[in-house]
Amino acid sequence: MEFAFRKAEPDDAPAMARLITLAWQNAYRGILSDALLDGIDAEERSGRIRSAIGSGREFQYYVLEASGEIAGAAAVCACRDEDLPGAAEIAVFYIRPDLQGRGYGQEMMRRTLKEIQPPGGPPAALWVLRDNAAARAFYEKAGFQADGAEKALPGLEDAVTVRYRYAG
């Protein structure tokens, strides 16, 4: 399979929003309420993503393409945790549900880390829902380790997230 990994452009926002919405509904069913998941407005999400890509400020958005279609979406930023100064954070990382388990996620993670983590630099970090066993297993296989930090997300039904770090 031939992959292309590139910075996202504003016109990628609708495809990214659909992908992320489907990924949420697939990955978080049984963790978050059906009402929350079924109420996600992909069009509204698309507008937020388009605006964020266009501003180029806090987050850098990337897409993984396969056969000319967007197969994955990622966003990175400076780590927002005060105890990890200088670290990068993977804030968004989703593969289309119908493509999961086929190596797309591994390829996108490899390329994302290459973008954000210089050799010998500070660790990369990410947060994942504590009850999302599949994502946790994926991140652990990719070389991330839970570091003991946890936090609840009031905007997401107080779901608990755990932090993972990658040191290379």
Image: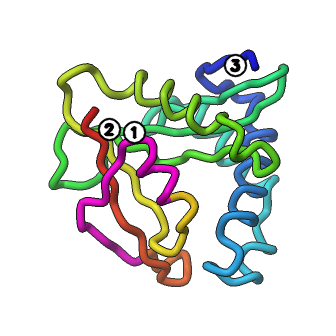
Please provide the residue range marked out in magenta: 136-152
Is 132 in front, or is 46? 132
- Residue 80 vertical placement versus 116 (above, below): below
Q: 101 above or below 28?
A: above
Membership of 157 in magenta stretch: no
Judge from the rendering whether residue 33 lies leftward or rightward of residue 85; answer left or right. right
Q: Residues within 10 Å of mark 1 (few under 14, many from 20)?
A: some
Q: Tell me the element at label 1.
A: strand
Quadrant location, the C terminus: top left
Relative placement, left or right, of 120 versus 76 is left
Q: Which residue is mark 3?
A: 3
Q: For mark 2, what is the residue?
A: 88
Seen at 69% across and 84% down, the residue is 33
Q: Is residue 15 above or below residue 11?
A: below
Is tag 2's residue or tag 1's residue first in the polypeptide sequence? Answer: 1
Q: Position of residue 149 (x, y in %)?
A: 26, 67
Looking at marks 1 and 3 on the same chain, the residue that comes earlier in the sequence is marked by 3
Using residue 53 as the reference point, say whether residue 11 is left or right of it. Answer: right
Label 1 sits on residue: 77
The amino acid at mark 1 is Cys
Given contact means CB atoms under 8 Å apart, are the residues at marks 2 and 1 in contact? yes
Q: Taking 149 as reference, is 39 left or right?
A: right
Q: Identity of the amino acid at label 3?
A: Phe
Q: Residue 25 appears in which quarter of the rendering?
A: bottom right
Question: Residue 145 colored magenta?
Answer: yes
Label 2 – label 1 distance at C-alpha:
6 Å
